[in-house]
Structures are given as structure tokens and as C-alpha cells.
Amino acid sequence: MKTVLHKAESRGSFDYGWLKTNYSFSFSSWQNPEKVHFGVLRVLNDDTIAAGMGFGTHSHDNMEIITIPTSGQLEHKDSMGNHGIISKGEVQVMSAGSGIQHSEYNNSKEFPVSLFQIWLFSNKKNVAPRYDQRSFDFDSLKNEFCTIVSPMGENTGLNIHQDAWFSLGKLDKDFSYNYNLKNKNNGVYLFLIEGNITLNKLLLKRRDAVEITEFESLEIISNSNSELLLLEIPM
């Protein structure tokens, strides 16, 4: 097993006034040649958007975009005619494919919205754009992971054009969890949302992340009540 630890404070942190963000990979005004991508994982942004503010209409293509709100409500509009609100407990996927325009705004005029937005390179070029969202019962999770994203054609989670699985887990203090790769050629990017865990003798604290390759199974030991995002992706 090979691991590369990324401490939370090593991310690109910016306060734009209307947007407070942390970039795990090179993005916008933060460019780090040592952090451009991990396999097909290109973006993992940890955003907080001020009340009534957001991203105006902009374009994407040939990218799988996954949005996971952690508080508040995010309003989505796109050039396919989709218009909806997503909030904590829901996940949104957008396959940009041959090209799509969309906007994202905080739906509240009083409170901020916080979210993770993740981009993966697609495994098929110029497919028809698509959009989907789904609610998940994250509150009932206890010492287990819930699959929120999976490859096209699978019946668990939201489907994307990539051989990738995203799982969100909640582990109690002193609980040990074993994760087995679904594809032996994949790697894992593990992002600790909250808590404190040990993985392969590495100690991870809140918002730390670790890249993991050349393994088939890994043991996660939770040193406190913890919430994790596990991304299994092609390398």
C-alpha cells in the first residue's frame, strides 16, 4: 500500500467575500504543480457561499460534477431546463458531456450554504449532458458507508460516466472498518469531513485527506466519532 497524506492546512484557502473556499487541487487563482489531480479526480472544493450569492451561468464539458451540500440550500439552473434546490442529505450529479451551462446560487437570503463540489474526468467524450439528484438517509448511518455515486448502469447511488464509487460513512469512536476495492486497478482518495481516524499508521484530523494506491483492502480506525468521504477512482 502506498499513501500520500495531505493536511487540511496545505489546501489553497481563499476568502473572496461572498465565497470562502479551500481547494484540494489546483483551481482558479490557486495553482500548485504538485496538486493538479489524483487519477481522474480533478477537483475537490470545500465551499461556503454567502446568503444570496453564487456562481453565475458558466460552461462545462466532458466532466462529471458531483455536489454534496453539508448545510443550507443550493439553487441549480442549467441549459437543459433543470431547476431545483439541493440541501443537506441530498447529492447532485451533472454529466457535462458535449457541453452544458449552469448556475449555482445560495437559495437563502439569510444563511450561508456549505458544500463539497467534486469533478472527475469522464470516461466517454461528448456524451449527451445529463442531470440527477437524490436524497440519502445519512442521519441513520452508523458504522457503515453509503454508496452515493457509482458507474453508469449500477443500481446503487447516482450514476456517472466513470468507473468510480463515492461513499459517505459515519463511524463511532473506536470502531474499525475494512474497505475492499471494487476494482483492483483503482485508487482511493479519502477525505475526512469530521473527526479523527488512523489509516495505515497515518493520523488524519478534520479535513485532512490521503491518497491510497496499490492495495485491495484497507482498515480505517475511528479515534472519535467521524464522518468520511471515500472516493474510489481509476488511476
Image (spheres, rainbow, N blue to C red):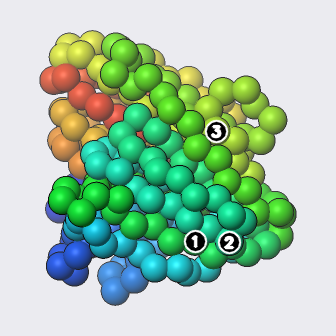
The three-letter amino acid code for the residue at tag 1 is His
Q: Tag 3: Cα neighbours inside 10 Å, few (<14), some, or many (≥20)? A: many
Tell me the residue at 18%/16% (across/down): 173
The residue that disc 3 covers is 158
Mark 3 lies on a secondary structure that is strand
The residue that disc 2 covers is 79
Marks 3 and 2, how far apart at CA? 20 Å
Q: Where is residue 222 in the image (x, y as percent from the top left)?
A: 24, 23
Tell me the residue at 83%/63% (across/down): 128
Tell me which corner region of the image, top left, top right, bottom left or bottom right, holds residue 126: bottom right
Mark 2 lies on a secondary structure that is loop
Q: Position of residue 226 (x, y in %)?
A: 24, 28
Tell me which corner region of the image, top left, top right, bottom left or bottom right, holds residue 95: bottom right
Marks 2 and 1, how far apart at CA? 6 Å
**Left or right of 22 in this view: 44:** right
Tell me which corner region of the image, top left, top right, bottom left or bottom right, holds residue 24: bottom left
**Left or right of 186 in this view: 202:** left
